[in-house]
Image: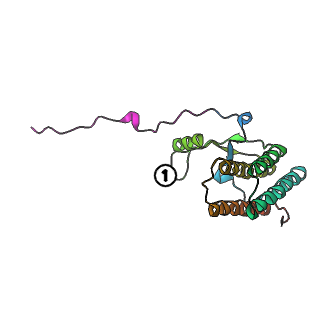
Amino acid sequence: MTNSLTFPKIDACDQEQSVTSPRYHPSDSSPDTLDLLVPWDLPVECEPKAPEKQKIEQSLRSLLTLLQTFSLQTPNLQQAQTQLTQLQTALTKPTTTPAQITNTKTALTPTAIEDYDTYFHITHVQTQTSTDTALCLTHGLLTNCHKFITLCLSSSAINPQHTHQQIQGFITYLHLLTRIFNISPLD
């Protein structure tokens, strides 16, 4: 009789185990947390209501000036960080709800996405109104710019060419948002 190796059933490991993540509350949002709309809620066009549209336009205009200055000369990073914090604070917070991601339409499982989001301080959210969608996207850009400036402050080893490319990417995304929000060109 031949002895064959048998593998123990690994039913307990069939499902991925997630790192413990804190429960999301809208009040928990901080400048260090990036609220991202779920991909299926990304708008092709989205016109916020009048009072918020003006605030968004003002924020994007100020951000464009800051980014262009950053791109053209050696910026005062501490001042840029302060300006970004002021822009984030001045803009109304969007009303969001946590997104329930049950299917990713990729090879990633919802558990893997949750782990990634926890590690990188990302919260996938959904909005109900076009104004909240516009605010969420604008806050997301401001948060990314703030994190980038913080990274530049903490490291002197960043390649200037890569910095320039990142700034150009922010400017391109800013122009995309102005088109989506039906805001007149800022240049």
Is 87 positioned to the left or the right of 13 in the image?
Answer: right
Which residue position is annotated with label 1? 107
* Label tally: 1
Residue at 71% x, 40% y: name it.
Answer: 97
Is 13 positioned to the left or the right of 108 in the image?
Answer: left
Q: Is residue 75 magenta?
A: no
Is 9 positioned to the left or the right of 26 in the image?
Answer: left
Q: Quadrant of the N terminus?
A: top left
Q: Quadrant of residue 119?
A: top right
Where is residue 11 drawn, in percent x and y? Answer: 37, 35
Where is residue 14 drawn, in percent x and y? Answer: 41, 39
Secondary structure at numbered mark 1: loop
Is 4 positioned to the left or the right of 127 in the image?
Answer: left
Q: Main secondary structure of the magenta part?
A: loop
Where is residue 18 drawn, in percent x and y? Answer: 51, 36
Residue at far left of view: 1
Residue 44, visible in the rendered structure: no
Residue at far right of view: 51
Magenta-highlighted residues: 1-22
Which three-letter amino acid code belongs to the residue tagged 1? Ala
Residue at 72% x, 38% y: name it.
Answer: 29
Q: Quadrant of the C terminus?
A: bottom right
